[in-house]
Image (tube, rainbow, N blue to C red):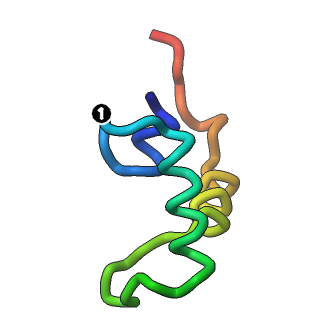
Amino acid sequence: MPLQLLLTGKLHGPEISGSIILIYKAGICGVISPQASFKTLDKRFKMLREIAWEAYNFEK
């Protein structure tokens, strides 16, 4: 579910594999208006790599 939330912004919805394909295609073909603040898969993964994960305590 974290991957679904990251990629779609929603906790529930359609199968994630279909969503990934749609996000990728939307990012490369330019059908999304710049005003929509759409993030391509490349940008999303770049954002993930920039997070200082070691700063988070995931153990509770």
- Can you tell which quarter of the image residue 27 is in? bottom right
Image position, residue 4 (x, y; %) = 45, 39
Image position, residue 34 (x, y; %) = 40, 89
Rendered position, 53 above or below 33: above
Q: Quadrant of the N terminus?
A: top left
Rendered position, 16 above or below 38: above
Q: Quadrant of the C terminus?
A: top left
- Can you tell which quarter of the image residue 41 is in? bottom right
The count of marks equals 1
Q: Say which amino acid is labelled 1.
A: His
Q: Pick the residue in front: 19 or 10.
A: 19
SS assignment at label 1: loop
**Where is mark 1, residue-wise?**
12
Image position, residue 13 (x, y; %) = 31, 38
At 40% from the left and 50% from the top, the residue drawn is 8
Neighbourhood count class around disc 1 (C-alpha, 10 Å): few under 14, some 14–19, many 20 upward: few
Rendered position, 43 above or below 19: below
Q: Is residue 1 left or right of residue 45?
A: left
At 67% from the left and 62% from the top, the residue drawn is 46
Rendered position, 34 above or below 8: below
